[in-house]
Amino acid sequence: MAGPRPNTFLIGGPKCGTTSLAHYLSEHPDVFLGYPKEPSFWSVDLKRSEAVVRLRGLDDYLALYRRAGSAKIVLDASTSYLLSEVAVARILAFAPDARFIVILRNPAEVAHAYHMEKVFNHQEDVEDFETAWSLQQERRAGRRVPPTCVEPAELQYLAVASLGRQLERVTSLVRSEQLLVLFTEDMARDPRAVYLAALGFLGLPDDGRTDFPVVGGAHFNRFRRLSRLYQAPPAILKPLVRSAKRLLRAHLSAALKSRMTAAIAEHRPRAAIPRSFALDLRRAFAADVALTEQLTGRSLRHWIDET
C-alpha cells in the first residue's frame, strides 16, 4: 500500500510517561499519531487484544496512517515493542532509518504501575500487587492465569519491568543516532526540557508548547462490569465493541470524551507498597538497574537504595 508509513517508534517502557509524550508530540503540527496509539503490530511474539482494531496484515497496519498527509513524523507508540524479542528487528527491516524513543523509570515503580494497568484492563484478576508478584512462577507454568488475559507473558512483572535488559537488546540493533533514551523522573521535573530534547532528536522546531499535563496516570475502574465489557469483551462482542470505539472517537469532541472517561474511571494514587516488599523489589531489580547504568552512563543508585 502506497502512502505515509510510520518512521518513528515510541517503544516504551510501559507506565513510563509514554502516553504523555505521545500526546504532546501528537499535537505538534509536524507529527501524526495513528489510532490506536498502540497497534502493537510488530510484536508478533506477543498476543495482542483486538478489542480496538483487528490488523490482518501490513495493509491494515498502514491504513492506520493513511491520513498522515505530509507529516514529517509518523508515530507508532506501542510499548509492547520494548518487551518483544522480535519487534525492533522487524521494524528495522520495514524502515531501516526508523527512529526509536525509549523512556526509562525505576523498575519497581514500573512493575507496580503495570500491575495496576493490567487490573484496570481486566488482564489481571489479583488486585493486590504483592500477591500477584508471588504468582509469577506459577503463572509461568500456565496456572492461575486469568481467562481474560490475552498475553500471559505480560503478567511476568519482573521481566516486563526489567528495562535494562530490554534496552540492551535495542542498543544491539539500533544505531546510536537513531535512538533517544529519556527518563520519567526528568519528565516529572522539567517536562518542557524533555519535550524539547524529543523535538531536537526528531528534527522538529519548537512549537512553543508550555502545557504538559500528565496523561494516563494512576487510574481505577468505577464500574467493573461495564469496564470489563468495554476493555475485555467476550469474543462474540468484540466486533461490536471495536465499531463502537471507532464511532465514539470519530464523532465525540475531546471534551466530551474526557468527561466520559472521568465518569467511568477515577484517578487516585496507588496504594503504598509495604516496606519489606519494597526492599524485595529493589533487590530483585538491582542487577537490571546496574545494566541500565552501564548502558546509559547515568547513576541510578537512588532506584535501589534501601534507605
Image (cartoon, rainbow, N blue to C red):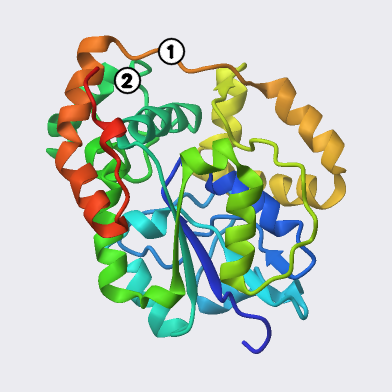
Q: Is residue 194 left or right of residue 259?
A: left
Q: Nearer the viewer, mark 1 or mark 2?
A: 1
Which residue sits at x=55%, y=60%? Answer: 54
Q: Nearer the viewer, residue 230 or 13?
A: 13
Expressed as whole percent of the image width and height from the top left, the position of residue 34 reads 66, 63
Expressed as whole percent of the image width and height from the top left, the position of residue 199 reads 64, 64
Q: Quadrant of residue 137?
A: top left
Q: Is residue 292 left or right of residue 211?
A: left
Q: Nearer the viewer, residue 11 or 232?
A: 11
The residue pinned by badge 2 equals 129
Which residue sits at x=23%, y=43%? Answer: 289
Mark linked to residue 271? 1
Which residue sits at x=63%, y=54%? Answer: 195
Task: Classify mark 1: helix, strand or loop.
Answer: loop
Residue 123 seen: no
Q: Is residue 77 left or right of residue 122?
A: right
Q: Quadrant of residue 224?
A: top right
Numbered marks: total: 2
Q: Quadrant of the C terminus?
A: top left
As shown in the figure, which amino acid type bears the numbered disc 2? Phe
As shown in the figure, which amino acid type bears the numbered disc 1? Ala
Expressed as whole percent of the image width and height from the top left, the position of residue 127 reads 38, 17
Indicate whether 259 appears above or below 170. Answer: above
Q: Quadrant of the N terminus?
A: bottom right
Mark linked to residue 302? none
Which residue sits at x=58%, y=21%? Answer: 221
